[in-house]
Image (spheres, coloured by chain):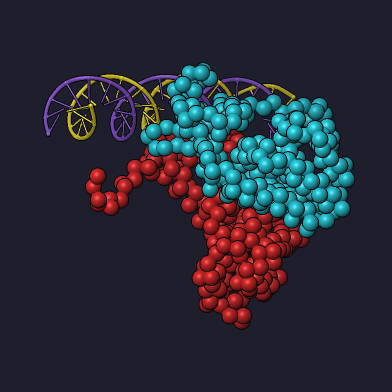
Chain colours: A cyan, B red, C purple, D yellow
Amino acid sequence: MAALALAALRSDVSLSVQVYEGIRAAITATNLYEIDEANLRLDERELAARLGVSRTPIREALVRLEHEGLVTSIPRRGYYIARKSKTELLEIIVVWAALESMAARLTALQASDEAIASLRTIFATFDGERIAAKLDEYSDANIRFHQRIIELSGCEQLRRTAGSIFIHVRSIRHRTIAENQRFERSIVDHLQIIESLEARDADLAERLVRDHALALAAHVNANDNDL
Amino acid sequence: MAALALAALRSDVSLSVQVYEGIRAAITATNLYEIDEANLRLDERELAARLGVSRTPIREALVRLEHEGLVTSIPRRGYYIARKSKTELLEIIVVWAALESMAARLTALQASDEAIASLRTIFATFDGERIAAKLDEYSDANIRFHQRIIELSGCEQLRRTAGSIFIHVRSIRHRTIAENQRFERSIVDHLQIIESLEARDADLAERLVRDHALALAAHVNANDNDL
DNA sequence: CTCTGGTATATTGTATGCAAAATACGAACC
DNA sequence: GGTTCGTATTTTGCATACAATATACCAGAG
């Protein structure tokens, strides 16, 4: 029995998984709701050719993505990048609200002080006035903030579940942050959330996070009619 | 344009999907945590032979199931029915708590009186004394009750998300209902939940449902050490 | 008798082949 | 001119074939 700390060499990167990760990253990188109809189609042959593999791993990857809700398949017609309807997006925000508010509860109860403190640093480079000027950066920070709360919960299953709808929530937040000066409200909400976590007030943190997310839903419902 | 209300004949049931549903139903029907190690293996060839199809649709179905978390694949070694560890089960209950409590909130706010009333009928055939005698039936009713709250929310995304972890929650509830006379507590909790919904008290309903689920987690954590 | 090493077998992962269905295109008809 | 029908082409869905890896089995050494 050797005492060497050998790292297990992973041959678990099958083509199928690599293709899945590749396509997923590509979809994640594009702004779903700003590409035109024509580019929504995912041609098996084209993907196979471009990635230099056969159609089999492509299909398995597409099946994965379909189950995840990132692409839809129309039988005998092919796979398409899935754009969610307004109703679906509203529902997704509701699910996100459920998950993140539970995460906030867990974070308040379990996370370390340092972990909670790390939430403040996300917004360190912003002060009240400069947000409007650096809206893109602020949007990223905003998204990271919400993702981080889920991470801090330490609940892997929560993270995974949220992960599969994250791309849509991210897209919504990115699109709506500029509307109606929402970022002003946003920065206030975030601060309150952080404070409630620091105070270890699980009920309050949960409520604030939920209401923050549901306010987003209400905003989308009222404003984004072009979905 | 014909005015006939012809039902579209669905050719959308690809073998791949049929196989997926078949295997899923089969796994759902068995009690995951009571079968022995040997029967956990899912042999592609055997499945293909038994279902009379080739390995291709079998594999696509297995990929779906893997993404859903019902089976795990060990690269180059095959697919296995996934049994969750105790930690994973606890996390799954937490996610369920998040989803069902949000569903309770929505139900309190949006569901019709009749819909809420239907929750009572689930337990119609039980009165206090006879539960212990009909524990299996009561366990089914119990599970239906929780599932129904999620349905009543009218949120399809919530339903889908919960659906993918339902089998595990069901299994846990089924296993633990008999322990420590938990069903007594259960019947009281359920009644309170129904009353809060009837009173349209969203905050209370949410809290009761969450605490009910988290109590289950606490129970599992304290009692089920053989996972 | 136990353990090591090598070979045979079985099984996965990927590529390719083939049939059925859908789309595209064009001709014929109204 | 617009619609409808029929054919050619493309593309999916499934089956099969093949290569690489893992398991099983057995022989031989200690």
Front-most of residues B79 and A64: A64
- Residue at image point 67% right, 62% down: B206
**Residue A97 position (above or below residue B150):** above
| Residue lying at 81% horizontally and 46% vertically, measured from the top left | A191
Left or right: B131 as drawn, with respect to A191: left
Q: Is residue B155 above or below residue A149?
A: below
User: Which residue is at 75% across, 42% downward?
Assistant: A184
Give the quarter of the image for residue D2: top left
Of residues C6 and B166, which is closer to you in this image?
Answer: B166
Is residue A136 toward the left or the right of residue B110 in the image?
right
Number of on-image labels: 0
Quarter in which the N terminus of chain A is drawn: top right
Q: Nearer the viewer, residue B219 or B79?
A: B219
Q: Residue at x 48, y 52 (%)?
A: B25
Tell me residue B58's x, y (percent). 45, 38
State left or right for residue A101 relative to residue B130.
Answer: right
Report x, y in % for residue A81. 51, 33
- Looking at the picture, tell me which residue is in the foreground, A55 or C7: A55
x then y, percent, for residue B20: 46, 44
Residue B183 placed where, x, y %? 65, 72
